[in-house]
Image (spheres, helix red, strand yellow):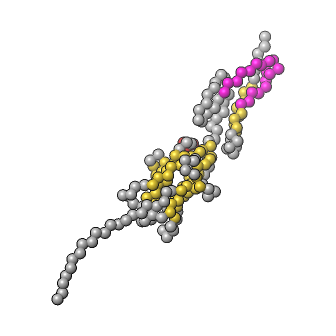
């Protein structure tokens, strides 16, 4: 006697999310949670590495800025338990000052992204240095001051020099000169 049996199987594909993303600088130091990465210099290279462990299937790992993907290339082998994405920006722009980058990891579209946000510290180059009369202003990217002079006849022909210097930025100084002209009665 031959009998036939029918079975119905339900298969559920299980996706396992990776660990929370960890971010490292060019020296291999971990950027702590809620701490800024950097400082980076405007016009110089910016390097950050985002790493996760685990995940099934192998997770995607992407870098984002203002809703735009910066880098989606995985820099580790498929066989590795750790997934790595190294972000390299050769010429750091000024508008990254105060920016927040995101590293997003996910093993499945259905599971959503695990996001690690990292604020950036950018030291900017000076743009210009001008002597202006009676001005004072300070913003995130500009500092100015008022100078009052009491000149005497002996100051005629001397130079007035305004010098700006940023010790955190290589070659970060500039100056503007004006010759003083004293008219006497």
Q: Residue at the location (35% across, 66% down)?
A: 13
What residue range appears in magenta? 145-162
The quarter holding residue 166 reads top right
Residue 85 image position (x, y, % from top left): 52, 59
Q: Residue at x 66, y 27 (%)?
A: 145
Predominant secondary structure, magenta span: loop
Depth check: give the residue in front, 156 or 110: 110
Would residue 92 be visible to someone looking at this image?
no
Q: Between residue 174 and residue 4, name the one nearer to us.
A: 4
Q: Quadrant of residue 60?
A: bottom left
Whether 54 is drawn above or below 177: the answer is below
Q: Is residue 155 magenta?
A: yes
Residue at 74 percent across and 27 percent down: it is 160
Residue 6 in picture, x, y percent from top left: 21, 77
Q: Is residue 138 above or below residue 113?
A: above
The image position of residue 126, as x and y in percent, is 64, 38
Whether residue 156 is situated above or below residue 101 in the rendered picture: above
Quadrant for the N terminus in the image: bottom left
């Amino acid at each position: 006697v031959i009998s036939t049996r029918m079975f119905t199987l339900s298969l559920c594909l299980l996706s396992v999310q990776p660990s929370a993303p960890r971010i490292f600088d060019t020296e291999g130091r971990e950027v702590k949670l809620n701490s800024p990465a950097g400082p980076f210099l405007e016009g110089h290279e910016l390097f950050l590495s985002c790493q996760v462990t685990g995940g099934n299937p192998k997770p995607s790992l992407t870098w984002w800025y203002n809703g735009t993907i910066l880098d989606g290339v995985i820099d580790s082998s498929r066989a590795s338990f750790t997934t790595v994405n190294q972000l390299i920006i050769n010429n750091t722009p000024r508008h990254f000052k105060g920016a927040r980058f995101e590293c997003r990891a996910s093993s499945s579209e259905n599971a959503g992204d695990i996001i690690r946000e990292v604020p950036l510290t950018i030291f900017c180059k000076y743009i210009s240095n001008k002597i202006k009369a009676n001005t004072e202003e300070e913003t995130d990217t500009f500092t100015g001051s008022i100078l009052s002079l009491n000149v005497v006849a002996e100051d005629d022909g001397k130079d007035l020099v305004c010098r700006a210097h940023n010790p955190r930025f290589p070659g970060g100084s500039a100056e503007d000169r004006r010759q003083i002209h004293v008219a006497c009665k």
